Image: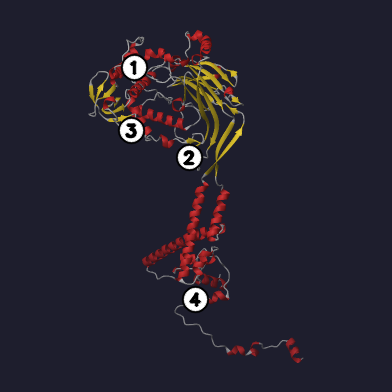
């Protein structure tokens, strides 16, 4: 079928007419069209302004406005992820926290002597060598001679050393022989190695069991610190080999530790305390642990309505080398938290009444993207070894214990055991001490990655403590009070109580004001969008529709033009290659098409007189002239040979 004349003219117009708008053939034409049609006044003024100076000023003003918009929007976006802190105080009945109490001395020294006899012997020998300290012959029982003889070998391998001078030589206190110091030197009391008089420096050397040349000397400017650190090192090795059931019997029972108990004005006893065994503090007892499903609460503040206990410390049965202070340690914590006595415990004096007033605070932080905290710890790649709710301390201790097992092949005694691991001891792990000290050094320097992995908890409870101390019992009441307490416990103690063996503890709420500290987003999405709109309107007289227009023109249309030009170039190259191989002349259909000759253009409107006038003339054709008239067409009578009857009648009238 023949093509209609109207469609032919439309097709010719599409191939020849210049194009404006998104279908422009070049980016410059697209940008000019955008500036003339956009709602942002600055862009339009760049195009329509006359004179280079005025056009340059409008370019600078427009670019400055765009820069200010980007800067202000970036500030708004950063402020969107900030949080505001709100504090709410309310008065209500408060749940009483868990209170964990431990004797500073973990085990009865009288019961532990048979396990520590060789260690005590070496320690006393070191004191005699260093400071001339001497005691009579020890009356320690020797019921476990095989145990002690085995441990003695390890004391000889890691003896105390006295650094003679700066020539890296030291005296072995066990044998009295001098040895050369190899490896690194770590001063544990300060960052300065060999501070003070070198004759006062005492320490011990640890070497890699697999490589005797790999050694480290740990020195202390204080002989007390050196002896205690060395004693604890061997002490942990001994305790790691004793079964848990035996250690629980060697420590204090609830009857031994607790003399009297009152809570909220009512009497309480050991049934209100839950025992758990701490590796470094022996048997500890938690009041109001919540294990039976009941958590006690209080509706009145003041010392009369809190927890009041009298503790029996038994100073005479303390280990003289393990601990140097007398009293108890307590920690106030939530029922779902693990009590880290060694980290944040509060010490209680003997012969004194210690009052601890509490203020309760609950805190809630926003998680990502506002802060880097964790809700439950499930997103932290560290196994929780404590079976309690997540905390930063639990994560750090668990991470170190896991690194200890992976690097040294055994677990450190002061922390819970991972599944399938066992505590380090000389017999099975002769290299564990050197490995532990090296690993702990990396942990302190944050080289293990634990501080980078572990995060703060988003929600936590905190009891702010205020401690006050008074002399107890008073001079006038001391006699009768000690007599009564001795009578109550006389059948078990078999001796008269001394006030230095007693400690009075009171834990209570100073008031029932609960503070709740929470973080809230400083901005919402609605406020953020409103601020964006205000900045766009202030600097560019622009709206959301304008932003959509910018995205369409500068991204979609510009990309379309670039891709179309590349496609045309590739197609032209391919056609030229085909013609070169076949030797054919270029066809009219092969000519590059521009403007409306684009598949995107689907305008099927017929051409108008105005568009026809805009058609370009052929390059090699002469200008069109008006043709001469055909005079034969002026002869109208030849065109109408017969006259109609009605016209004849009209003519007669």
Q: Which of marks 4 and 3 is nearer the N terminus?
A: 3
| 3D distance between C-alphas at marks 4 and 2 | 68 Å
* SS type, badge 3: loop
Above or below for 238 versus 32: above
Badge 4 vs badge 3, beta-carbon distance below 8 Å: no
For label 4, the residue is 616
Q: Seen in the image, is 4 located left or right of residue 234?
A: right
Q: Earlier in the sequence, mark 1 or mark 3?
A: 1
Answer few, some or many: residues within 10 Å of disc 3's Cα (few below 14, many 20 plus, some between 14 and 19): few
Say which quarter of the image contains residue 640: bottom right
Answer few, some or many: residues within 10 Å of disc 1's Cα (few below 14, many 20 plus, some between 14 and 19): many
Q: Report the disc number at residue 372.
A: 2
In front here: 561 or 209?
Answer: 209
Q: Earlier in the sequence, mark 1 or mark 2?
A: 1
Q: Among all residues in the image, which is located at the extreme right?
A: 653
Q: Earlier in the sequence, mark 3 or mark 2?
A: 3
| 3D distance between C-alphas at marks 4 and 3 | 90 Å
Q: Report the disc number at residue 356.
A: none
For label 1, the residue is 119
Query: Percent from the top left, x then y, of residue 368?
Result: 50, 41
């Amino acid at each position: 079928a023949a093509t209609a004349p109207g469609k032919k003219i439309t097709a010719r117009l599409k191939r020849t007419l210049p194009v404006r708008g998104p279908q422009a053939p070049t980016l410059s034409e697209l940008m000019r069209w955008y500036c003339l049609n956009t709602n942002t006044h600055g862009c339009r003024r760049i195009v329509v302004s006359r004179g280079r100076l005025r056009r340059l000023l409008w370019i600078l003003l427009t670019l400055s406005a765009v820069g200010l918009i980007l800067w202000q929007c970036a500030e708004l976006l950063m402020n969107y992820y900030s949080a505001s802190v709100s504090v709410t105080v309310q008065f209500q009945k408060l749940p009483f926290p868990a209170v964990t109490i431990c004797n500073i001395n973990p085990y009865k020294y009288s019961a532990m002597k048979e396990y520590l006899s060789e260690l005590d012997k070496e320690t006393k020998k070191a004191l005699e060598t260093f400071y001339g300290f001497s005691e009579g012959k020890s009356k320690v029982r020797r019921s476990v001679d095989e145990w002690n003889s085995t441990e003695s070998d390890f004391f000889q391998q890691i003896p105390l050393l006295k650094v003679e001078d700066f020539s890296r030589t030291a005296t072995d206190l066990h044998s009295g022989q001098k040895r050369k110091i190899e490896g690194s030197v770590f001063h544990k009391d300060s960052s300065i190695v060999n501070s003070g008089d070198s004759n006062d420096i005492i320490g011990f050397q640890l070497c890699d069991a697999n490589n005797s040349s790999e050694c480290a000397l740990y020195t202390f400017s204080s002989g007390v610190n050196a002896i205690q650190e060395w004693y604890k090192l061997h002490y942990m090795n001994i305790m790691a080999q004793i079964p848990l059931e035996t250690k629980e019997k060697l420590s204090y029972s609830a009857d031994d530790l607790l003399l009297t108990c009152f809570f909220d004005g009512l009497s309480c006893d050991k049934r209100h305390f839950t025992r758990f065994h701490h590796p470094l503090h022996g048997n500890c007892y938690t009041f109001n642990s919540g294990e039976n499903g009941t958590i006690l609460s209080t509706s009145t503040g003041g010392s009369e309505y809190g927890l009041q206990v009298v503790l029996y410390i038994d100073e005479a049965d303390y280990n003289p080398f393990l601990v140097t202070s007398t009293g108890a340690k307590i920690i106030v914590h939530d029922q779902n938290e693990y009590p880290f006595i060694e980290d944040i415990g509060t010490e209680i004096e003997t012969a004194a009444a210690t009052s601890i007033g509490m203020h309760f605070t609950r805190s809630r932080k926003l998680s990502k993207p506002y802060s880097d905290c964790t809700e439950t710890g499930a997103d932290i790649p560290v196994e929780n070894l404590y079976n309690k709710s997540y905390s930063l301390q639990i994560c750090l201790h668990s991470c170190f214990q896991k690194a200890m097992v992976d690097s040294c092949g055994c677990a450190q005694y002061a922390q819970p055991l991972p599944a399938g691991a066992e505590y380090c001891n000389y017999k099975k792990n002769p290299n564990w001490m050197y490995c532990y000290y090296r690993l702990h050094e990396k942990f302190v320097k944050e080289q293990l990655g634990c501080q980078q992995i572990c995060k703060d908890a988003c929600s936590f409870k905190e009891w702010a403590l205020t401690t006050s101390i008074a002399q107890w019992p008073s001079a006038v009441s001391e006699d009768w009070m000690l007599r009564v307490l001795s009578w109550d416990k006389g059948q078990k103690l078999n001796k008269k109580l001394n006030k230095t063996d007693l400690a009075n503890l009171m834990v209570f709420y100073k008031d029932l004001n609960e503070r709740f500290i929470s973080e809230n987003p400083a901005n919402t999405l609605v406020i953020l969008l409103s601020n964006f709109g205000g900045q766009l309107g202030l600097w560019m007289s622009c709206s959301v529709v304008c932003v959509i227009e910018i995205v369409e023109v500068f991204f979609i249309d510009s990309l379309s033009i670039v891709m179309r030009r590349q496609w045309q170039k590739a197609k032209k190259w391919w056609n030229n290659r085909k013609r070169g191989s076949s030797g054919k002349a270029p066809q009219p259909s092969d000519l590059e098409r521009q403007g409306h000759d684009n598949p995107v253009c689907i305008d099927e409107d017929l051409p108008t007189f105005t568009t026809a006038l805009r058609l370009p003339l052929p390059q090699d054709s002469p200008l069109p002239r008006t043709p001469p008239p055909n005079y034969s067409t002026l002869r109208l009578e030849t065109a109408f040979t017969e006259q109609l009857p009605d016209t004849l009648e009209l003519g007669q009238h």
